[in-house]
Image (cartoon, rainbow, N blue to C red):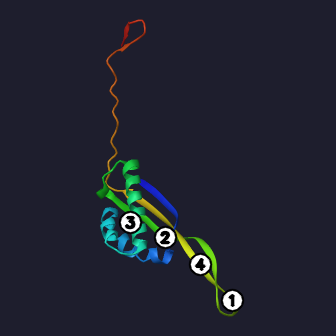
């Protein structure tokens, strides 16, 4: 059982966001939130919000506790670039690339038993006439 979350065009460069991946992948998602909460960079704040959203999605979709979730996939990919130019010396244009990133998170729930829904059938069913059938 797994839950997917994909966040696109986040305003942080992929290189800065990938810095946290080796440390986070070893932890459970709920523990990685504690780790990222006390980091000071903007990339940590964006990753914190993305992982928190993925955990909430998994909680709603899979109906499991937070501590049963594990990372199956956590990647940061290159997104769009905003290309701008600033005037440079001797009439040259100096490029500015504002990079964005896509974050893909797949959470899986291990050791979860599926509950079978048991539907109790009534002993008799009344019809519109009022007679009982067995």
- Choose the circle earlier in sequence order: 3 or 4: 3
Q: Quadrant of the C terminus?
A: top left
In this rendered view, identify the residue nearer to me: 1 or 97.
Answer: 97
Residue bearing the label numbered 4: 97
Label 4 residue SS: strand
Label 3 residue SS: helix
Disc 3 vs disc 2: Cβ atoms closer than 8 Å? no
In this rendered view, identify the residue nearer to me: 88 or 18.
Answer: 88
> Which circle marks residue 106 in the picture?
none
Horizontal and vertical percent position of residue 44: 39, 71
CA gap, disc 1 to disc 2? 34 Å
CA gap, disc 2 to disc 4? 18 Å
The quadrant in which residue 119 appears is: top left
Residue bearing the label numbered 3: 48
Tell me which residue sits at (42%, 72%) in the image.
42
Q: Nearer the viewer, mark 1 or mark 4?
A: 1
Tell me: 97 left or right of 61.
right
Label 2 residue SS: strand
> Which circle marks residue 76 in the picture?
2
């Amino acid at each position: 059982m797994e839950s997917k979350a994909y966040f696109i065009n986040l305003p942080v460069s992929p290189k800065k966001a990938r810095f946290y991946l080796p440390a986070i992948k070893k932890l459970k998602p709920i523990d990685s939130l504690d780790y990222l909460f006390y980091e000071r960079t903007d990339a940590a704040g964006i990753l914190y919000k993305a992982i928190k959203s993925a955990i909430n999605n998994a909680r709603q979709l899979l109906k499991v506790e937070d501590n049963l979730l594990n990372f199956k996939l956590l990647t940061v990919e290159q997104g769009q670039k905003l290309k701008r130019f600033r005037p440079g010396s001797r009439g040259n244009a100096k490029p500015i690339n504002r990079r964005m990133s896509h974050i893909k998170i797949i959470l899986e729930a291990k050791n979860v038993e599926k509950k079978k829904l048991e539907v109790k059938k009534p002993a008799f069913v009344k019809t519109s006439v009022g007679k009982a059938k067995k």
